[in-house]
Image (cartoon, rainbow, N blue to C red):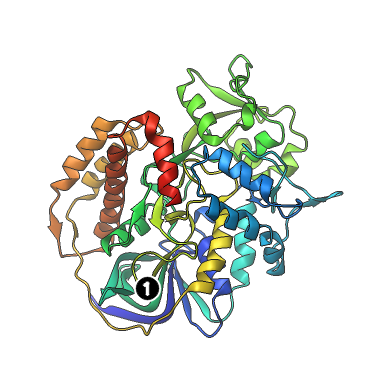
């Protein structure tokens, strides 16, 4: 098999908002290559519905900070949240300079409100298709020094003298060596490891494995957010939290409000609502009878429900895996503890989300910290180096059996016995040097799941009443 070689100043693994925001702000004198495991649009950013939270129109960012801290049960790092909300005040105006058009009404911006927000501060573009609209325009704005290569599976980072100098990959089925002066991981979260998720299928924790292999520190991997409202149909579809902000209410089959006990009702923090819906016996619906202009404001949801024959007045929902708060430990500018390696977006643990992310803070994080990485990045001369890679020698059938097992324990209430069984079984797998794209992709997914399982089991050794305090201290360190 022939080996292709590409050289670039900066390699960004990912093509979502974190990757694109970084690329937009890198000096034009540097060459930038973005690589996508699937198509360029196969990202969680493109799927984002809710919008972008920003205190752009508020007098200060203090209320946004307080909502962020409260949603996380005060486990977010206060200093990092300051960065997010203060610099995030400029995000809307900055995106508009790149041609993004946010929704407006007769009073100005058509702001939405979502769970755990005190105020209407969610900016939308195209109703409930914010991600698609924002990403399409920002990708069009990428300068000439930035190029994109699709269908690239990065299966290992290459190191030389303690520094990351590139990556080994497959472009389709052909082997590819990428030499770079700096590497940025923007690979997203972990949702694609299981079927019941709001995430793109390609988002399977690759960045965690790549960083771990070269010695970068991973933190808080057990902090996983489950979204309360995925469409309860054969295939998962996210039902945006903005629908509840517009007046929809979570009810049971008899019409009783299932969140009536909470002061914030159906707009309580995501982790609270997801837990209630998980424990609830019987179906839960979103009653949308009080939502005005539903078809105009939520076109994607309407089209999905119409296609599936679901009554828009009573939409059946259930929780599903949505966002990973933990990840690769980074400083305030996206640097890891490995020279030449940076991380940004959901794959990074910036400390801004703590144990529960505030709704619509994720796209804001991508923009704010993407800019910071671009400003801080240091590029060395790309140099040739080699790396030996071994993968699990398993059949597709065996791999699918493992995926099924992952789905049993990667839930809001993890099954520890299933988790231990998974770790034991994968620990005995045979390794081979005969690397193919399929074997490499399977190995990355299994190793990502192993990292998650190990982290969850490690946390189970501690008393649960002690968890919030200890986590807050760790995030702030």
Q: Measuring 86% from the left and 49% from the top, which residue is drawn there? A: 107
Q: Which quadrant is the N terminus positioned in?
A: bottom left
For the question of whether residue 74 can be seen, the reply is yes
Q: Outermost residue, top direction?
A: 254
Give whichever of 54, 284 is nearer the camera: 54
Residue at the spot x=31%, y=79% of the render? 4
Across and down, in percent, residue 133 comes to 64, 58
Can residue 235 be seen at all in this image of the molecule?
Answer: no
* Residue in the picture at 71% in, 69% down: 97
Quadrant in the rendering for residue 273: top right
Quadrant in which residue 88 is drawn? bottom right
Left or right: 433 as drawn, with respect to 89: left
Q: Which residue is mark 1?
A: 340
Across and down, in percent, residue 255 comes to 64, 17
Compared with 99, 105 (above or below) is above
Residue 2's image quarter? bottom left
Question: How busy is the neighbourhood of tag 1: few (under 14 within 10 Å), some, or many (20 plus)?
Answer: many
- Residue at image point 28% right, 62% down: 215
Which residue is more in the foreground, 23 or 292?
23
Measured as percent of width and height from the top left, residue 280 is found at 49, 20
Relative to 95, say whether 377 is above or below.
below
Percent coordinates x, y for residue 349 in the rendering: 44, 54
Instruction: Determine the secondary structure under disc 1.
Output: loop
| Number of marks drawn | 1
Q: Is residue 228 left or right of residue 150?
A: right
């Amino acid at each position: 098999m022939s080996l292709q070689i590409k050289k670039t100043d900066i390699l960004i693994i990912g093509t979502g908002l974190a990757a694109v925001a970084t690329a937009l702000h890198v000096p034009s004198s540097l060459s930038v290559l973005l690589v996508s495991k699937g198509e360029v649009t196969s990202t969680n950013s493109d799927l984002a519905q809710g919008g972008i939270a920003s205190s752009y129109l508020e007098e200060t960012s203090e209320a946004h900070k307080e909502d962020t801290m409260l949603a996380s049960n005060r486990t977010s790092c206060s200093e990092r949240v300051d960065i997010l909300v203060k610099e995030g005040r400029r995000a809307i105006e900055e995106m508009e300079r790149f041609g993004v058009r946010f929704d407006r009404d007769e009073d100005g911006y058509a702001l939405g409100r979502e769970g755990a927000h005190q105020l209407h501060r969610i900016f939308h573009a195209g109703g409930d298709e914010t991600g698609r609209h924002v990403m399409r325009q920002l990708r069009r704005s990428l300068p000439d020094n930035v190029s994109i290569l699709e269908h690239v599976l990065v299966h290992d980072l290459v190191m030389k003298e303690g520094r990351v100098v590139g990556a080994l990959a497959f472009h389709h089925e052909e082997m590819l060596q990428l030499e770079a002066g700096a590497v940025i991981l923007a690979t997203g979260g972990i949702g694609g490891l299981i079927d019941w998720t709001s995430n793109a299928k390609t988002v399977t924790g690759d960045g965690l494995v790549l960083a771990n292999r070269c010695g970068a520190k991973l933190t808080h991997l057990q902090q996983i957010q489950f979204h309360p409202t995925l469409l309860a149909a054969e295939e998962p579809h996210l039902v945006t939290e903005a629908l509840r902000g517009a007046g929809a209410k979570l009810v049971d089959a008899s019409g009783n409000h299932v969140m009536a006990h909470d002061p914030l009702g159906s707009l309580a923090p995501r982790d609270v609502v997801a837990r209630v819906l998980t424990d609830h016996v019987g179906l839960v619906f979103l009653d949308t009878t009080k939502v005005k202009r539903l078809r105009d404001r939520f076109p994607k949801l309407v089209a999905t429900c119409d296609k599936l024959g679901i009554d828009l007045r009573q939409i059946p929902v259930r929780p599903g895996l949505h966002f990973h708060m933990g990840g690769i430990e980074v400083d305030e500018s996206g640097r890891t503890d490995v020279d030449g390696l940076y991380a940004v977006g959901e794959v990074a643990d910036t400390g801004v989300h703590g144990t529960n992310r505030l709704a619509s803070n994720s796209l804001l994080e991508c923009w704010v910290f993407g800019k910071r990485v671009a400003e801080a990045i240091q590029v060395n001369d790309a140099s040739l180096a080699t790396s030996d890679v071994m993968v699990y020698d398993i059949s597709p059938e065996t791999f699918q059996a493992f995926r099924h097992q992952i789905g049993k324990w990667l839930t809001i209430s993890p099954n520890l016995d299933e988790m231990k069984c998974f770790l034991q079984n994968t620990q005995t797998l045979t390794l081979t040097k005969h690397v193919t794209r399929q074997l490499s992709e399977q190995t990355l997914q299994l190793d990502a799941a192993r990292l998650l399982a190990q982290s969850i089991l490690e946390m189970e050794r501690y008393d649960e009443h002690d968890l919030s305090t200890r986590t807050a201290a760790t995030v702030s360190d």
